[in-house]
Image (cartoon, helix red, strand yellow):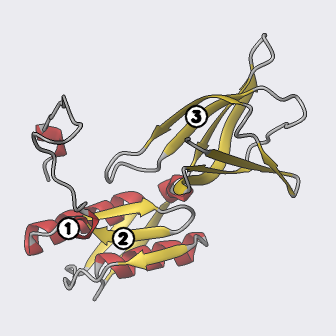
Amino acid sequence: MSKVEFLVSVDSKVYDIGELVTDISYTDKLNDGCSKLEFSYNDKNVKLRNGSAVSFRYNSANIFYGYVFKHGQSKNGEFKATAYDQLRYCKAKDTIVVKNDTVGTVVQKMCNYLKLKCGTLADTNYKLATSVQDDKTWLDIVYTAISYTLLNKGKKYRLADEFGFIALRNLEDLKLNLVLGDESLCYDFDYEKSIDDEY
């Protein structure tokens, strides 16, 4: 039986609204900003505010940890909210000098500057060229560094918020030990590759 744990924090009180949630939509794209969790629930006693912490687990798997950025109520009494993970704060613009840095050290600088929790940072073994990144978002600076690393080392990295901790991982390390074949339960799939995804 599937188990949903859906916790929200309001005024230092934590509520489990897993039984009250009527709709959940989770979106997370590879190296395209923060992940987003949209949800609806029915309980007038849980009044979310912008900034309320939200955590979502499914069958004990950590899916999402972030903060409410938008909330409201429909005329039928249903409450709706949109939450984003920590990468949402990385849209802040800044000017930094990249010198003797790898992608990992740039991510560490970003977390230190924005006071974000930092998790696993893969060592790319590639020093970025010295440059001045002027009036750019931290996300753009990191994604540019990931692109240069791919061009020069042939390895792609993923920046993500892993349940409250900013992490940088080699995509090779995220592969599943899984093969889909004739004996699997997979009966259909769609595959798409766009020129917009190329670096």
Foreground disc of the pair 1, 2? 1
The residue under the point 78% across, 11% down is 76
Q: Which numbered circle lies on residue 111?
A: none
Q: Which residue is mark 3?
A: 38
Residue with the most extreme bottom position: 100
In percent of width and height, residue 52 lies at 75, 49
Q: Is residue 169 visible?
A: yes
Q: Which residue is mark 2?
A: 168
Residue with the most extreme front position: 183
The residue under the point 56% across, 56% down is 60
Amino acid carrying label 1: it is: Glu
Closest to the observer, 163 or 107? 163
| Direction from residue 43 to residue 51 in the image, left or right | left
Q: Which residue is mark 1?
A: 172
In percent of width and height, residue 82 lies at 62, 36
Closest to the observer, 174 or 73? 174
Q: Earlier in the sequence, mark 3 or mark 2?
A: 3
Amino acid carrying label 2: it is: Leu
Neighbor class of circle 3 (other Cα within 10 Å; few <14, some 14-19, many 20+) is: some
| Direction from residue 156 to residue 85 in the image, left or right | right
The residue under the point 15% across, 35% down is 191
Question: Is 90 situated above or below 36?
Answer: below
Quadrant of res 100: bottom left
Quarter of the figure with the N terminus = top right
In the structure shown, which secondary structural element does the residue marked by tag 2 occupy? strand
Quadrant of res 133: bottom left
Do the residues bearing badges 1 and 2 touch, measured as CB atoms within 8 Å? Answer: no
Quadrant of res 144: bottom left
In the structure shown, which secondary structural element does the residue marked by tag 1 occupy? helix
Amino acid carrying label 3: it is: Glu
